[in-house]
Image (cartoon, helix red, strand yellow):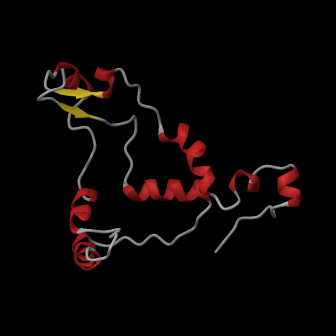
Amino acid sequence: LYEGKTIDCFGPADYSYKELAQFVYDITGQDPYLLELPKPIVKALSEITKFQPYPMLTPDLVEIMSMDYTPKMTPQEYNDSQDILTMADMGVEPTTIEKGAFEYLHRFRRGGHFILEGGYHSQHTYERKVWKD
C-alpha cells in the first residue's frame, strides 16, 4: 500500500526552530538567551562538538536543521497526487501544537503546575513566583 510512495507529514501551521524554542521556553518558564548565528559558524562549531561522546550538535544536524520542511505542494496538488501521501490519506487529523503542548511540557516547569495553581501545594510547598536559575 505504501511501497514506493512518499508520505509528507505536516501540521496546520509552520514554525521556525526559534519559534518552537520560544514556545517551549514560555510554557516551561525558562528564560534562556537565544543566539542566532550564521550557518557557516554553526557548521564550524559542529565540526568540534561532533567528537563528544554524545554530541548535541553535528554537521549533519546543522544541515537537517537548515532545511525547509514546509509542504512542497498546495492541498489540491496533494489530493491529485498518487505518489505522495499526507496524514489525511492515512486517516490522521493534524492538530495544532498549542492544543497538546502544555499537557506534555508543563511537567518540565520547575515546580510543575503547582507554581501556577492555588491550593495546598502553592501555600505550603512552593512559593508563587517565577523560578530563575
Horizontally, residue 41 falls left or right of residue 126, namely left
Answer with the quarter of the image where residue 50 lies. Answer: bottom left
| Quadrant containing the C terminus in the rendered view | bottom right
Answer with the quarter of the image where residue 131 lies. Answer: bottom right
Horizontally, residue 102 falls left or right of residue 1, namely right
Q: Residue at x 41, y 25 (%)?
A: 93
Q: How many marks?
A: 0
| Quadrant containing the N terminus in the rendered view | top left
Horizontally, residue 37 falls left or right of residue 99, namely left
Horizontally, residue 5 falls left or right of residue 111, namely left
Image height of 77 relative to 44, above or below: above
Q: Position of residue 100 (x, y in %)?
A: 54, 39
Q: Which residue is drawn at 25% across and 34% down?
A: 8
Q: Position of residue 125 (x, y in %)?
A: 83, 61
Taking depth in this image into account, of 3 and 69 the one nearest to the observer is 3
Q: Position of residue 55 (x, y in %)?
A: 32, 70
Q: Residue at x 53, y 70 (%)?
A: 32
Image height of 22 relative to 7, above or below: below
Q: Which residue is drawn at 26% across and 68% down?
A: 58
- Which residue of the protein is positioned furthest toward the left in this rendering? 4
Taking depth in this image into account, of 55 and 34 the one nearest to the observer is 55
Q: Position of residue 78 (x, y in %)?
A: 21, 25
- Which residue of the protein is positioned furthest toward the front in this rendering? 53
Taking depth in this image into account, of 44 and 12 the one nearest to the observer is 44
